[in-house]
Amino acid sequence: MLAVQGLSVRYGPIQAVRELSLEVRPGEIVALIGANGAGKTSAVKAIAGLLPHGGSVTLSGKPLPRRAERALRAGLALVPEGRGILGQMTVAENLRMGGYARRDRASLPAAIEEQMRRFPILGERRDRLAGLLSGGEQQMLAIARALLSAPRLLVLDEPSLGLAPIMAARIFALVEELRAGGMAILLVEQKARQVLKIADRAYVLETGSLRASGTGAELAAQGLLSDAFMAAGAG
Amino acid sequence: MLLQQLVNGLTLGAVYTLVALGFSLVMGVLGILNLAVAELFMLGGYVGLTLMLDGQPLLVGLGAAALFTGLLGVVVERVAYQPLRNAPPIAPLLSTLGFSVIFQTVATNVWGSDPLLLPPELMDGRYQLGSISVGQAQLVVMATAVGMVAVLALVMRHTRFGYGLRAIAENRDVARLLGVPAPLVTSGAFALSGAMAGVAGVLIGLHYGALTPFVGVEVGLKAIAVMVVGGTTSIWGVLLAGPLLGVLEVMTVAFGGAAFRDMTVYGLMILTLLLRPQGLLGRAGGAQRV
């Protein structure tokens, strides 16, 4: 489904991501893990078309457009780090924005209702400014909004960041539920141990380069999931 | 006397409001002050009034002004902003200043530097409402301004373009991730901003019964004061501050003398910056957008 080959991202003289290659297959949760500054967010922003990059990115065999608004229409939705909630719009308006790029606009109201059934708290707070929601509610809104574009690949950047453990567990459970529905998911996380409980495979980034890849057990066997490694090196 | 001045002030405030909304739309989306808005206001006035003097009805004058200055707004965006969007913010500010000088020079060459005087019979009706006398031009100015604000509110709240504009104003990257074509919507913001200013230019001509190529500087600066007092990117703030400054100006002239007119308006602007820099309805930290 998603195939990334030799992805490179630069900020002036600084190389944030170096020759990264990864793959996400249909119905798979793939984790991209690494420490702060490892280049995870730069990598997914580049894949989603928010940053200029070198290398190739394809979705279902076709080159993914290098502009975010077109990448979305091609089937990739990114929930950015920090959730990207439009805080001065209401919950309902944020959800409506989720369907901005839908081809079939007539079905949007029904799709919004479906997301409100999936996340009843959003239905209860539909007229509230999104900026007034709790962190967990905002994350639900961000995911619901992304789903309204009917993506084939969902990219989540640090969805558990700043959330209480119980809320983070709910978000991870939701991600598993989406996979069960056939969606492909690329999950960027710093909490490697937690995310590897649900991920089929993972890639470990270290200072912009791919350090290793494999299943959770394979990475653990290489000692790449130790707290010290995750905090200081790559993880 | 007081009520009469209130009506006069609200009329002037209606014009300030429209021009300030022109500034505020671009400020909200891009965070830059498009100084060319002031001269689009002046050019819109000349285009609309020239057509009206030629016998065209008011609606044709207003529509032509909006179309002309809306298109010019897009030209300003493509030439003065797009190529400089990654440059320091002072660069597009100066390039829009360059455009405003060019527009003023063009107007001076086309229409001359003497005031364009409107014959009184163009809009000379007067209506007596108790002790208040309201001119036909005043009614047209206020009705048009209210209509434009209502249309703007509808566009912002109920159209795809409005949703995209509000999303970009709040977070450009997130808006793009949601599929908003940012360059197209940004051009639309410049067009809408130019069109509002152009319509306001026709209205100020009707209000004063005359127009000069230098009216853009005077009214443009007042509109910037309105924007600052209301909250630089808050539409509601502008809707409050526009009439407020219009009334303040007219009351100052009526009860204090013309010499103090600008002093009170800009004094209020400075006071706002000192005591409440985010403006009356703006949010601290500058997060408030369109």
Image: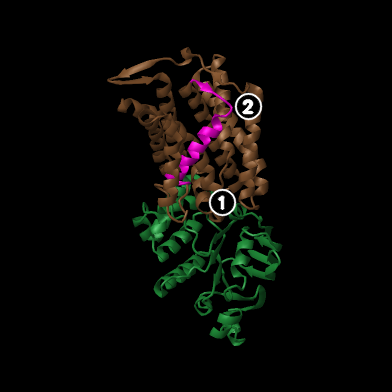
Chain colours: A green, B brown
Mark number, residue B285: none
Res. B180 visible in picture: yes
Marks 2,1: beta carbons within 8 A = no
Percent position (x, y) of residue B119?
50, 14
Which span is picked out in magenta?
A: B209-234
Rendered residue at 47%/47% (across/down):
A107
Percent position (x, y) of residue A23?
64, 69
What SS does tag 2 mark? Answer: helix
**Residue type, label 2:** Ala
User: Is B196 left or right of B256, judged from the image as shown?
Assistant: right
Residue B230 highlighted magenta (yes or no):
yes
Picture quarter containing residue B238? top left
Observer-nearest of A131 and B139: B139
Is the N terminus of chain B in the top left, top right, bottom left or bottom right quadrant?
Answer: top left
Res. B147 visible in picture: no
Rendered residue at 70%/70% (across/down):
A18
Q: Are marks 2 and 1 on the same chain?
A: yes
**Residue type, label 1:** Gly
Q: Give the answer, above or below, for where A196 lies relative to B218.
A: below
**Circle 1 residues within 10 Å: few <14, some 14–19, many ≥20:** many
Q: Which residue position holds label 2?
A: B107
Residue under mark 2: which chain is it in? Answer: B
Q: Give the answer, above or below, for where A207 lies relative to B23.
A: below
In the rendered image, the residue lying farthest to the left is B130
Mark number, residue B179: 1
Residue under mark 1: which chain is it in? Answer: B
Q: Give the answer, above or below, for where B13 lies relative to A24.
A: above
Percent position (x, y) of residue B56?
54, 16
Q: Main secondary structure of the magenta part?
A: helix
Residue A106 highlighted magenta (yes or no):
no
